[in-house]
């Protein structure tokens, strides 16, 4: 078994704090296990013959000392079925590892391997008991590619409450490792540095609706295409979330620009959910994405990535959830076929997932 623990240098010297008598230690964890099968071809690790090798297990250790200081370490074990992304995932990895200083209830500082404030789902992307589907929307967040759950650096968070409104601002700087795709079945690791960005949330009075915007710029330093390492990539995400007693609405839009000039990725999703009893919930999601790639002196190509999903969830308890979901997709994320959107039409396939999630 491989064990990968790569603590950021900023975190190492914080592992020996001066503890006060007011010290609290807690352990949390979650399991997200699924079986998936497609009707043809392979989609994000889900083959035609089916696989049970889809899961995420994590343990989080939280040490709080004094009134303002805490250390958080989260270890993770993740499996992505037959996906080639699995070649870049170790059996056990350090998911989070950071020090947090809370100046007061409205201002905090995190240093180390910190959850990246990015949209609605990024900080809870694997906690199945709070997700409507087994996976978060891949067109907006990726599936092991181009986005990251954490940033190796620093995050400063500030909250305000002017009247009945709530405002939350996160500023961050650092870098992270990710994976970029050359095609649907070929990936390469990328190190992103000098990532600078922010996320801002506005929660309306009554706390039923909130609106957010995220934006950052980063510099890829290792990639299959040497030209990528000399340019920045810009990513922006807009988010909206509304919740009532029995209904939930979420929607997000992402726009990413990259070299060569004129190339971009644009995607969105809409999620509608309803809980028609204490145990049962129904979810529908429509997701659309389009890539535009400019090849100088050759051509400009574009391809669409569509995913419509319907899910039925049963909660034994709030911390034990069983999910049944069906997806109809059309696009180029077919890993064993790897169609080229410059020359080939999109491929349509259907797949289903059965998953069980638990947390403590």
Image: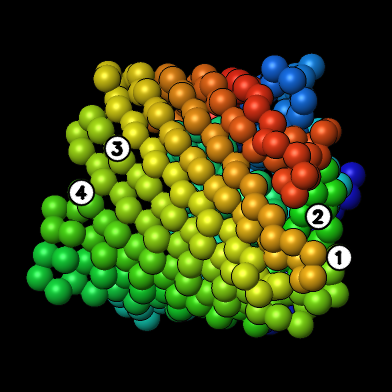
Pointers 3 and 2 in contact (C-beta within 8 Å): no
Of tags 2 and 4, the one toward the viewer is 2
Pointers 1 and 4 in contact (C-beta within 8 Å): no
Who comes first in sequence, dot 2 or dot 1? 2
Count residues near mark 2 (Cα–Cα under 10 Å), then give few for <14, some for 14-19, many for 20+.
Answer: few
Q: Mark 4 sits on what residue? A: 208
Which residue is painted at 49% across and 40% down in the image? Answer: 287
Who comes first in sequence, dot 3 or dot 2? 2
Of tags 1 and 4, the one toward the viewer is 1
Q: Give the residue at the far left of this rendering.
A: 163
Which residue is painted at 57% across and 51% down in the image? Answer: 290
Q: Is residue 97 left or right of residue 140?
A: right
Q: Is residue 97 visible?
A: no
Foreground residue, 107 or 88?
88
- The numbered mark at residue 248 is 3
Which residue is painted at 79% across and 17% down in the image? Answer: 49
- The numbered mark at residue 263 is none
Q: Is residue 130 left or right of residue 273?
A: right
Who comes first in sequence, dot 3 or dot 1? 1
As measured in the structure, the alpha-carbon distance from the residue carrying label 3 to the one carrying label 2 is 36 Å
As measured in the structure, the alpha-carbon distance from the residue carrying label 3 to the one carrying label 4 is 10 Å
Q: Mark 1 sits on what residue? A: 224
Q: Is residue 109 visible?
A: yes
Which residue is painted at 54% across and 34% down in the image? Answer: 307
Image quadrant where residue 52 sits: top right
Q: Position of residue 1 (x, y in %)?
A: 89, 44
- The numbered mark at residue 182 is 2
Q: Is residue 47 left or right of residue 146?
A: right
Pointers 2 and 1 in contact (C-beta within 8 Å): yes
């Amino acid at each position: 078994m491989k064990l990968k623990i790569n603590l950021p240098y900023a975190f190492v010297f914080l592992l020996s704090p001066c503890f006060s008598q007011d010290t609290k230690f807690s352990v949390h964890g979650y399991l997200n296990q699924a079986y998936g099968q497609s009707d043809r071809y392979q989609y994000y690790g889900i083959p035609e013959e089916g696989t049970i090798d889809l899961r995420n297990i994590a343990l989080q250790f939280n040490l709080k000392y004094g009134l303002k200081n805490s250390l958080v370490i989260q270890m993770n074990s993740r499996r992505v079925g037959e996906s080639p992304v699995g070649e870049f995932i170790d059996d056990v990895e350090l998911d989070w590892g950071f020090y947090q200083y809370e100046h007061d209830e409205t201002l905090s500082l995190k240093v180390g391997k910190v959850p990246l404030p990015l949209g609605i789902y990024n900080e809870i992307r694997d906690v199945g008991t709070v997700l409507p589907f087994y996976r978060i929307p891949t067109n907006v967040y990726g599936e092991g590619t181009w986005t990251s759950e954490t940033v190796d650096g620093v995050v400063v968070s500030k909250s305000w409450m002017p009247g009945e409104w709530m405002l939350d601002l996160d500023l961050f700087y650092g870098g992270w490792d990710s994976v970029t795709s050359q095609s649907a079945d070929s990936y390469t690791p990328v190190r992103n540095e000098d990532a600078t960005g922010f996320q801002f949330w506005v929660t309306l009075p009554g706390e039923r609706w909130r609106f957010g915007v995220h934006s950052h710029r980063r510099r890829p330093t290792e990639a299959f295409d040497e030209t990528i390492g000399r340019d920045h990539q810009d990513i922006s995400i807009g988010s909206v979330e509304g919740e009532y007693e029995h209904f939930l609405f979420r929607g997000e839009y992402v726009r990413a620009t990259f070299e060569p000039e004129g190339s971009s990725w644009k995607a969105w999703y809409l999620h509608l959910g309803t809980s028609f009893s204490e145990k049962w919930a129904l979810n529908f999601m429509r997701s659309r994405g389009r890539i535009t790639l400019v090849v100088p002196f050759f051509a400009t190509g574009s391809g669409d990535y569509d995913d419509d999903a319907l899910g039925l969830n049963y909660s034994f308890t709030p911390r034990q959830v069983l999910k049944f979901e069906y997806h109809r997709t059309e696009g180029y994320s077919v890993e064993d076929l790897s169609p080229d959107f410059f020359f080939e039409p999109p491929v349509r396939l259907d797949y289903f997932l059965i998953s069980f999630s638990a947390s403590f």
